[in-house]
Amino acid sequence: MSGQTELELAGQVVELVRRLGGPAAQAEAVVTRADLALTRFANSGIHQNVSESTVGVRLRVHVDGRTAAGGGSVVTADGLSALVERTLTVARLCPPDPGWPGLTPPMPMPDAPPVDEATAHAEPDQRADRVGAFVAAAGGLSTAGYCRTAHRSSAFANSAGHSAYGRSVEAAMDGIARRDGADGVARRSTDRLSDLDGAELGAQAAAKAQAAADPVELPPGHYEVVFEPAAVADLLQNLSFYGFNGKRYAERQSFAEPGAAQFDRAVTLVDDPLGGSGLPFDAEGTGRRALTLVEAGTTRAVAHDRRTAAEAGAESTGHAVAGGATWGPMPRNLRLTGAVAGPASAVGRSTTGAAAGAVVDADTAALVAGVRRGLLVTDLWYTRVLDPKSLVVTGLTRNGVWLIEDGTVVRAVRDLRFTESYPRALGPGAVLGLGARAVRQPERVDGAWWAAPSVRLASWHFTGGASG
């Protein structure tokens, strides 16, 4: 970077577009420095510690009514010139872009929460300490997973004179414990590495693995369910990508109907990018803020970038992402809130091979206590959308399913396949309870996370065993 800051580099790229593309060329540039570190473990031992520090440049230009985007990681003078020339050449070969919404004008940026410097500059032994605590707490069970830290500093500049700068950090841990082929899982995402308790997560994963031994097979059908936060995270992700996406809404491929009571009154969904350590602006330089998508069951909004906002006669909500012309704007920091569950009265009852209190925390146990007959589900995976308009999804359970009878977790169940409409499952009258504590779950996408409590749902359609 030759001593240049991210903001100086972004400005340099915009100036290069002006020089090489002419004064009429419009440009926006994002420069991000990412310091990422990952400590992996398997067979109860650390086998890999990796870190990387990269600088990436994203450029979008609009020339002669045509738009193109490009990116690169060579931030020398020659490398930046090559990026600009390449992107301008591509733009001139692209079809006209009549929907170009123009550049973000200069605007004030919201105040972002401060980053935790200890997390930004975490050392390998700090992650290793948490891995060691996870392994020790598993009590001899085989364990695997990772602990990661990330620090990003990002700058935005465009030829309309707008610029912005921000930083973000994240720490996350995801691990399993295994007993006789049965897995238990524990995950957490935070803004501070010091908030990750490896021993707590390891004990949680081990307790689930112990309780998941000797599962029985249940017939398919509609079951009342209690979903733990890891499973709820999959609901939030799919609702975000397919439902509250302004591009899909404009294309009539979304279930969302702003103003309609589409969810149970217990459900409030807020996209809160600054509720954690997040950047104060999106890929177009628009300031980010909390956006209420669902309020007490009523759909209030969908996410917009500048393009979808212009089509809808609205304003950008600060949800532009790289590649947004293809994928559309997506809320990626979704938090589920709502009514608080009753007292945790189910803790301590017996299960096959483990105490119920060891299988679930007190927050989830309060929901379990009200179930006459149903299933406790830890996690969902391999989920695929069958019908985007109604958001019918098929997928599998994993990392622990248990039968509940008369408020008691009684035995482990083999994994099941499901086919279910996510909005229907959360619809009016369908949510029988929410836990009191939202647990933030990590995501593979940069800067994304999902925060939710455990949820009790009146019905979930299981269509068969894991094999079909």
Image (spheres, rainbow, N blue to C red):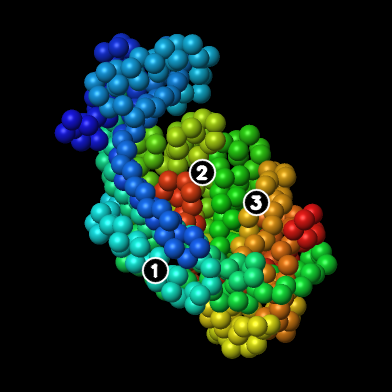
Work out whether 129 lies above or below 249. below
Write down the residue under mark 3.
382
Mark-to-mark CA distance, 1 and 2: 36 Å
Near mark 3 (Cα within 10 A), the count class, few <14, some 14-19 or many ≥20, is few
Identified by mark 2, the residue type is Met
Residue at 39%, 68% (x, y): give it.
132
Q: Where is residue 129 in the image (x, y as percent from the top left)?
A: 34, 67
Q: Do the residues labelled 2 and 3 touch (CB within 8 Å)?
A: no
Q: Quadrant of residue 381?
A: bottom right
What mark, if any, has residue 132 been given in the picture? 1
Q: Residue at x 64, y 43 (%)?
A: 254
Residue placed under numbered mark 2 in the picture = 330
Cα separation between marks 1 and 3: 29 Å
Q: Earlier in the sequence, mark 1 or mark 3?
A: 1
Residue at image coords 54%, 45%? 302
Q: Residue at x 45, y 50 (%)?
A: 448
The amino acid type found where label 1 is placed reads Gly
The image shows residue 109 at horizontal and vertical percentages of 29, 44
Say if residue 162 shows up in the picture: no
Mark 1 crowd level (few <14, some 14–19, many ≥20, 10 Å Cα): some
Nearest to viewer (mark 1 / mark 2): 1
